[in-house]
């Protein structure tokens, strides 16, 4: 399997068709990571509405989600009758961080925030991606200026696998229309100005005219707003 092979599989295909083609043609473990965002909910629907069972769906439960995020998780599992595997942070790492640095230490510096992200998200992701050959994500170019050079299929050197970003050039309106058309469960916080939803202490609603990522780690410089999952 190489990048040209994968590009040929998805060329000129829509969301559902490309996922089905990958599931039928890729030899090896395929995984999809969901944070229950509208993008991820769209991809989840595209997978499960076609009964594609060899794409393994997982989530990184940091332990600090909004209650509304857990609600959409529950509704999704019940709607599609399909389990979503959770990966949790190492309990000793969380305990040591909180004991030594404080329950909300991530507000104090970028380094402390990134350490928290590493413990709660990056390390569990490493476990989730073990032995995987292809990782499907909900990344869109609109999410961040840092993603302007992202490709549909790209090699992830850090995790030693290929990534597929099927919604890369979808607009927010296109994603919302897809959610509405297929009556897909979504996080009700989206209707209250929360456009990028992560951990509860690190997410706020955005105001009119603010950047898409303004609600994430809003106390930091706008150029540093990544958590380490996507490089």
Image (tube, rainbow, N blue to C red):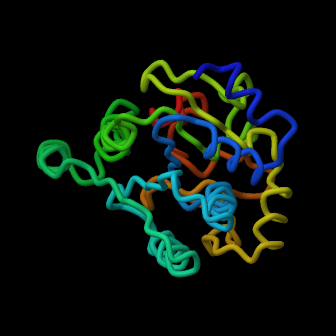
Instruction: State the quadrant of the N terminus.
Output: top right
- The structure residue drawn at horizontal position 63% and vertical position 45%, both measured from the top left corner, is 24
50 or 64: nearer the viewer = 50
32 or 191: nearer the viewer = 32
Residue 173, percent across and down? 85, 58
- Residue 81 is left or right of residue 213, and the answer is left
67 or 2: nearer the viewer = 2
**Count of marks overlaid on the render:** 0
- The structure residue drawn at horizontal position 51% and vertical position 77%, both measured from the top left corner, is 81
- The structure residue drawn at horizontal position 61% and vertical position 19%, both measured from the top left corner, is 2
- Residue 223 is left or right of residue 177, and the answer is left
Quadrant for residue 63, please give it.
bottom left
- Residue 159 is left or right of residue 105, and the answer is right
Instruction: State whether residue 186 is above or below residue 18.
Output: below
Residue 172, percent across and down? 80, 54
Quadrant for residue 61, please give it.
bottom left
Residue 200, percent across and down? 45, 61
- Residue 85 is left or right of residue 77, and the answer is left
Residue 45, percent across and down? 66, 64
Instruction: State whether residue 79 is above or below residue 212.
Output: below
């Amino acid at each position: 399997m190489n990048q040209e092979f994968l590009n040929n599989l998805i060329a000129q295909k829509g969301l559902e068709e490309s996922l089905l083609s990958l599931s039928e043609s890729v030899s090896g473990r395929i995984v999809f990571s969901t944070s229950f965002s509208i993008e991820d909910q769209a991809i989840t629907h595209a997978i499960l509405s076609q009964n594609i069972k060899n794409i393994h769906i997982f989530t990184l439960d940091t332990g600090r989600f909004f209650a509304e995020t857990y609600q959409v998780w529950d509704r999704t599992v019940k709607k599609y009758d399909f389990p979503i595997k959770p990966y949790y942070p190492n309990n000793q790492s969380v305990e040591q961080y909180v004991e030594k640095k404080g329950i909300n230490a991530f507000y104090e510096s970028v380094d402390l925030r990134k350490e928290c992200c590493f413990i709660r998200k990056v390390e569990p992701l490493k476990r989730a991606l073990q032995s995987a050959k292809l990782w499907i994500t909900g990344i869109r170019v609109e999410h961040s200026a840092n993603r302007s050079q992202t490709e549909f299929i790209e090699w992830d050197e850090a995790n030693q696998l290929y990534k597929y970003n099927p919604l890369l050039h979808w607009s927010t309106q296109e994603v919302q229309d897809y959610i509405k058309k297929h009556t897909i469960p979504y996080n009700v916080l989206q209707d209250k100005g929360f456009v990028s939803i992560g951990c509860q202490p690190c997410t706020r609603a955005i105001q009119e005219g603010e950047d898409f990522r303004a609600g994430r780690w809003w106390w930091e410089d706008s150029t540093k707003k990544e958590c380490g999952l996507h490089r």
